[in-house]
Image: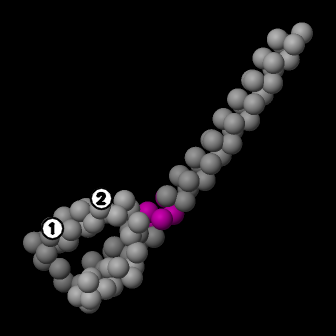
């Protein structure tokens, strides 16, 4: 009897944990989607209002890839502001 109870509890616990993980995953996916939409809107507005040539855009892309790798994705507006103002 104890073995059956243990199996039942393990299955119940496993099911509860799996449900919690799935819910968290769904919430994160929805939030990632919302962030991507907002980023797309910002990118479109910036591209519309600024005249950036292809070479400058490629350099910016390379700089941003390097920076995101270096700081492990923890981008802060203030750091970008200081960089653009040449305060670094």
The tag on residue 44 is none
Whole-number angstrom distance, CA of label 1 to CA of label 2: 17 Å
Q: Residue at x 44, y 63 (%)?
A: 36
- Would you place residue 49 above or below residue 10 in this image? below
Q: Check disc 2 and report the residue beneath it.
A: 69
- Would you place residue 33 above or below residue 44 in this image? above
Q: Check disc 1 and report the residue beneath it.
A: 58
Relative image position of residue 54 (x, y in whole percent): 12, 72
Task: Examine the structure image and report whether residue 11 is included in the region drawn in magenta.
Answer: no
Q: Report the span colored magenta.
A: 33-37
Asked whether, in this view, residue 39 is left or right of residue 64, the answer is right
Q: Main secondary structure of the magenta part?
A: helix
Q: Secondary structure at mark 2?
A: helix
Whether residue 49 is visible, yes or no, is no
Asked whether, in this view, residue 24 is left or right of residue 1, the answer is left
Q: Nearer the viewer, mark 1 or mark 2?
A: 2
Residue positioned most to the left: 55
Relative image position of residue 22 (x, y in whole percent): 62, 41
Q: Are marks 1 and 2 in contact (CB under 8 Å)?
A: no
Task: Examine the structure image and report whether residue 35 is included in the region drawn in magenta.
Answer: yes
Q: Quadrant of residue 21?
A: top right
Relative image position of residue 69 (x, y in whole percent): 30, 59
Say few, some or many: other residues with alpha carbon within 10 Å of mark 2 (under 14 / 14 to 19 / 20 or more).
Answer: few
Residue positioned most to the front: 88
Relative image position of residue 2 (x, y in whole percent): 87, 13
Whether residue 25 is visible, yes or no, is yes
Q: Earlier in the sequence, mark 1 or mark 2?
A: 1
Q: Nearer the viewer, residue 48 or 2?
A: 2
Q: Quadrant where the N terminus lies? A: top right
Q: Residue at x 15, y 70 (%)?
A: 59
Q: Residue at x 74, y 35 (%)?
A: 16
Q: Quadrant where the C terminus lies? A: bottom left
């Amino acid at each position: 009897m104890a073995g059956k109870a243990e199996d039942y509890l393990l299955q119940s616990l496993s099911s509860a944990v799996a449900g919690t993980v799935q819910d968290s995953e769904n919430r994160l996916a929805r939030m990632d989607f919302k962030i991507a939409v907002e980023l797309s809107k910002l990118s479109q507005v910036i591209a519309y209002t600024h005249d950036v040539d292809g070479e400058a855009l490629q350099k910016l892309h390379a700089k941003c890839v390097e920076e995101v790798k270096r700081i492990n994705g923890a981008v802060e507006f203030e750091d970008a502001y200081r960089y653009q103002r040449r305060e670094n």
